[in-house]
Image: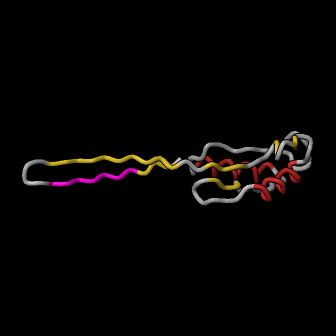
Amino acid sequence: MVMVLALYVTITPISLKIVFYSLTILTVRVFDILHLNGECLINYTLQDRRIALERSVKNVVRRMEVHGYEVAREAVEIERALRKVISEASEGLVIKVCFSPRC
């Protein structure tokens, strides 16, 4: 979530007027899909669900985006991704088994 703040100041001979506007822009980042057009995708592999997700969600910058992912094969790669998430103050790290259903 990004908080955008704008402060407008108007000075007149009689008084000082301060108007404060706050606008919150919410970006939805989608990383998995479990249902599509009434069909349950839970028993599909993550790889197949990812394909369905990318085909069905249109990216709109700063509104709705398909979240990127990295494939890790070793613990050191997962630790590197976790450290990146922490340094960027992101919301978390999701770890899934790529070829297993219900992940």
Quarter of the view holding residue 54:
bottom right
The residue shown at (38%, 50%) is 5
Report x, y in % for residue 24: 47, 47
- 10 vs 37: above or below: below
- Is 68 on the left or on the right of 27, as rendered? right
The residue shown at (20%, 54%) is 10
- 92 vs 11: above or below: above
Give, as a single range, the part of the protein colored magenta: 5-11
Q: Nearer the viewer, residue 91 or 59?
A: 59
What secondary structure is the magenta-colored segment mainly? strand
Residue placed farthest to the front in the image?
A: 37
Q: Nearer the viewer, residue 37 or 22?
A: 37
The residue shown at (68%, 47%) is 82
Report x, y in % for residue 80: 70, 52
- Is 84 on the left or on the right of 76, as rendered? left
Report x, y in % for residue 31: 73, 49
Q: How many marks?
A: 0
Residue 75 is a magenta residue: no
- Is 92 on the left or on the right of 69, as rendered? left
Residue placed farthest to the left in the image?
A: 13
Report x, y in % for residue 29: 66, 50
| Quadrant housing the C terminus | top right
